Image: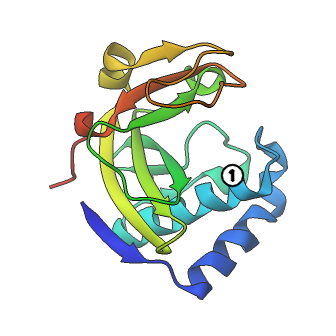
């Protein structure tokens, strides 16, 4: 997994993207979650120059188009590094969005690093993800879910060639 130091410029850009007028279409109203998501998008675009950003134009179902595929970038933030058995989630209300693959990043807020975890096709995600319902608690956690999510382990992800 590739790891990058998050710069102040990147963080400020993510905050700027969060306040961008196109984000009026987003369902997420939490500024921390929005900034985290935008940070992942910054690194995805930086590492995939041919990717065309589409979510600033009212498309809330995918973030980029690359090689004819619609990519939805997901970013998690925590105070520790990821492990292969850690889970990654997609909100249940987003599972039917028009995306071909999910691409995941992990932002370690203590080290201020972002880790490129990789991708999974939507088809593989749909087959492998486990549904957790509101009120459930993830294995090894004490936090009760406030919404339905589909979850897979990091070890299920692949890397671009």
Percent position of residue 158, x then y: 21, 43
**Residue shown at 53% from the left, 55% from the top:** 78
- Residue 38 lies, with reference to residue 127, above or below; the image says below
Residue 97 visible at all: no
Q: Which residue is mark 1?
A: 33
Total numbered circles = 1
- In this rendered view, identify the residue nearer to me: 11 or 100: 11
Query: Is 31 positioned to the left or the right of 78 in the image?
Result: right
Q: Residue at x 82, y 46 (%)?
A: 29
Q: On screen, 145 above or below 106?
A: above
Residue under the point 67% across and 40% down: 60
Element type where label 1 sits in the image: helix
Looking at the image, residue 97 lies above or below residue 126:
below
Q: Position of residue 25 (x, y in %)?
A: 80, 43
**Image point 42% across, 15% down: which residue?**
130
Is 123 in front, or is 154?
Answer: 154
Looking at the figure, which quarter contains the N terminus?
bottom left
The scheme the figure's colours follow is rainbow
Q: Position of residue 72 (x, y in %)?
A: 50, 43
- State which quarter of the image contains the C terminus: bottom left
**Residue 141 pos. (x, y %):** 51, 31
Question: Is the residue 33 above or below the residue 85 in the image?
Answer: below
Q: Say left or right for 5 vs 137.
A: left
In this view of the protein, can residue 148 be seen by the observer?
yes
Mark 1 crowd level (few <14, some 14–19, many ≥20, 10 Å Cα): some
């Amino acid at each position: 997994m590739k790891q990058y130091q998050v710069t102040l410029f990147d963080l400020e850009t993510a905050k700027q993207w969060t306040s961008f007028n196109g984000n009026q279409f987003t369902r997420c109203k939490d500024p921390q979650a929005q900034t985290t998501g935008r940070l992942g998008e910054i690194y995805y675009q930086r590492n995939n120059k041919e990717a065309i950003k589409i979510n600033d134009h009212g498309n809330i179902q995918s973030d980029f188009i690359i090689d004819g595929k619609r990519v939805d970038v997901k970013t998690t933030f925590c105070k520790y590094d990821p492990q292969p058995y850690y889970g990654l989630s997609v909100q249940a209300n987003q599972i039917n969005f028009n995306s071909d693959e999910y691409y995941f990043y992990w932002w370690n807020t203590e080290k201020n690093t972002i880790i490129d975890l990789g991708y999974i096709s939507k088809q593989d995600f749909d087959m492998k993800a486990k549904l957790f319902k509101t009120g459930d608690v993830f294995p090894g956690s004490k936090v009760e879910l406030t919404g339905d999510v589909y979850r897979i382990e990091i070890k299920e992800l692949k890397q671009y060639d």
